Every structure is written in C-alpha cells, then in structure tokens.
Amino acid sequence: MKKPILIPLIASSVLLGCQDSTQVSNENNKQTDTVAEQKVTVAKWVGEYQGTTPCMSCISRCEECPGMAVDLVLNQDKSYTLKRESLSGNDKREIYTGHFLFSNPDQSKLELMQVKTRNLIYVDLDQQLLEILEDQTGNIYNAEDDFILEKKV
C-alpha cells in the first residue's frame, strides 16, 4: 500500500507569513515617507524678494537718480543672499551672504547679519513683501513705498 504524502501546513504558513510581512513592511515604509514629507514645511517668509529702492545716500526717490535694484533670497535655514546694484552704474554691485535673526516672536522683523546698512526688514506675510526699515531707529521710512521688496512668484 502506498503511503499518502502530506504537505506540512507549517511550511506553507511560514511562506505566506513572509509575503504578508513584506507587504506590511512596504506599507510602513510608505507611511514613514509620507510623515517625513509632511514634517518638512517651508516657512512662509522663505523665498526671493525683489524691488527698486532709492540709492544708498537717499531716503526717497530722486528724479535724477534711477535708484538701486535689490534682490534678497531668504532660505529655510535662516541664511540669505542679498544683491544690490546701482541702476545709475556709479557704484559696483554688492553681494552679501550670511544669516539673519528675527527680532521678535511673531517673526515680523528680521536683521541681516554681516550687512551694515539697510539691514533691518519688516516681514509682511499677508502681502508677501518685505519693507526695508531705517538703520538707526528701525522705523518705517517716510517714503515707505520706495523701500518695498515683493516676493517673486
């Protein structure tokens, strides 16, 4: 008489268990990736801001002076790159890099470190713009519209 061949159920359940754990592992990895992506939120003030301001010696626009082109990039790690160039061609282009600090808890005022003049800035997140403040006082210039940098989209 022939003996029946029995296939052990333990071996087949182990094989199925391996497939299930691989699927569970892949699902866990996908969930971890999704959570990691959600944690990297970019601050609203991060971006590139541009504008034309009065030249460095003026507190408002002059008819005889075309002003200065300003390009400021604020990065997530609180580093910046500032480029200023006289539109009259009289002065050489200035490029500054460094870090900035917020001077208040609501992050509406910042100071560009390593820049001696026009380094105090008001951040308006609602309007997506920056406003350069007076050096000594930190107050708004009388001709405040002349010191606006708009966020580049």
Image (spheres, rainbow, N blue to C red):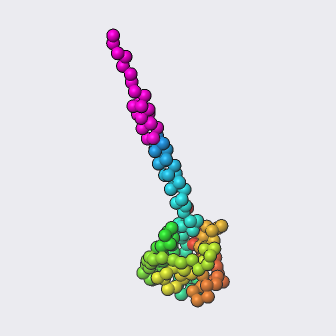
Q: Which residues are magenta?
A: 1-22
Residue 45: name its quadrant.
bottom right
* Image location (x, y in percent) of residue 104: 61, 78
Indicate the quadrant where residue 3 lies.
top left
Depth check: 21 or 144 in front?
A: 21
Q: Residue 63: x, y in percent?
A: 58, 81
Q: Is 48 or 88 nearer to us in this picture?
A: 48
Q: Residue furthest front?
A: 1
Residue sitting at 62 percent across and 76 percent down? 105
Residue 145 sits above or below residue 137 on the image? above
Task: Reply above or below: 6 against 17.
Answer: above
User: Residue 102: within the magenta?
Assistant: no
Q: Is residue 151 above or below residue 131?
A: above
Residue drawn at x 51%, y 79% is: 112
Find residue 110 and report its horizontal and vertical position in percent: 57, 78
On the rendered structure, is 26 left or right of 61?
Answer: left
The answer to whether residue 8 is magenta is: yes
Q: Is residue 4 left or right of residue 38?
A: left
- Residue 62 pos. (x, y %): 58, 83
Residue located at (42% from left, 31% from top): 10
- Most foreground residue, 49 or 26: 26
Please tell me whether residue 82 is drawn above or below residue 25 in the rendered image.
Answer: below
* Main SS, magenta residues: helix
Q: Is residue 3 rendered to the left or right of residue 55?
A: left
Which quarter of the rendering shows the C terminus? bottom right
Which residue: 48% across, 42% down? Answer: 24
Q: Quadrant of the N terminus?
A: top left
Is residue 63 in view? no
Please say whether residue 138 is visible from this viewpoint.
yes
